[in-house]
Amino acid sequence: MRITGPPRGPEQRRRDVLARLERESDIWVASADAGGLPCLVPLWFVWDGLAVWLCTRPTNPTGRNLRDGRRTRLALPDSRDVVLVDGEATAFTAEDVPAAAADAFGTKYGWDPREERAPYAFFRVRPLAVQAWHEVRELPQRHLMRDGAWLV
């Protein structure tokens, strides 16, 4: 990807971020355990317009870290069109997850984690901060959300 146009304004970057959250399939999930050991994995996700929903096994490092630490950084997979989301995670079992969130995985991916033999946990990540930029030229205005409120 070669970016040749002028830098996008904050409003356009917000629209682009929301569009990518709707259409992308994978998101990188960074978490850490109580001792600070980092974990970084790609997961399928669903955006409901207010939060990112993730699903993973509750016993793997990401599941434990999100449940216990509740903080995460998410990144969409493109190093030239960066989107970083810092958020707070809330854990749900397959039994207590809102049906709309779980059903969205079936709609988007043809997969319903609630039907698996092994247990899966769902995590709602409420964005607290969002940054987005195309290369260095958009770095000065990369902050689009702080403290859970859109700046633009």
Image (cartoon, rainbow, N blue to C red):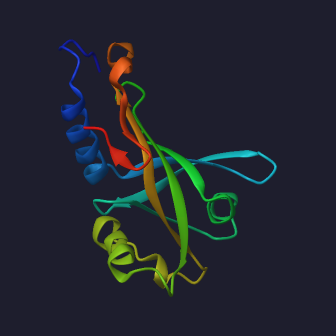
Q: Residue at the spot x=53%, y=61% of the render?
A: 89
Q: Is residue 129 above or below residue 82?
A: below
Position of 79 with respect to 73 (left or right) is left
Place residue 76 in its image quadrant.
Answer: top left
Considering depth in this image, is 63 or 8 the residue closer to the camera? Answer: 8
- Relative placement, left or right, of 21 versus 55 is left
x, y (%) of residue 139?
Answer: 38, 19
- Residue at the image position 42 percent from the left and 27 percent from the top: 79
Which quarter of the figure is the N terminus placed in?
Answer: top left
Q: Residue at x 70, y 58 (%)?
A: 61
Return the x and y of residue 39 as percentages of the image width and height.
67, 47
Q: Can you give x and y, in whole percent of width and height, for residue 4 in the image?
A: 21, 12
Looking at the image, residue 58 lies above or below residue 30: below
Residue found 32% across the figure and 49% down from its top: 24
Query: Where residue 74 sits in the image (x, y, percent)?
Result: 49, 46
Q: Nearer the viewer, residue 97 or 23?
A: 97
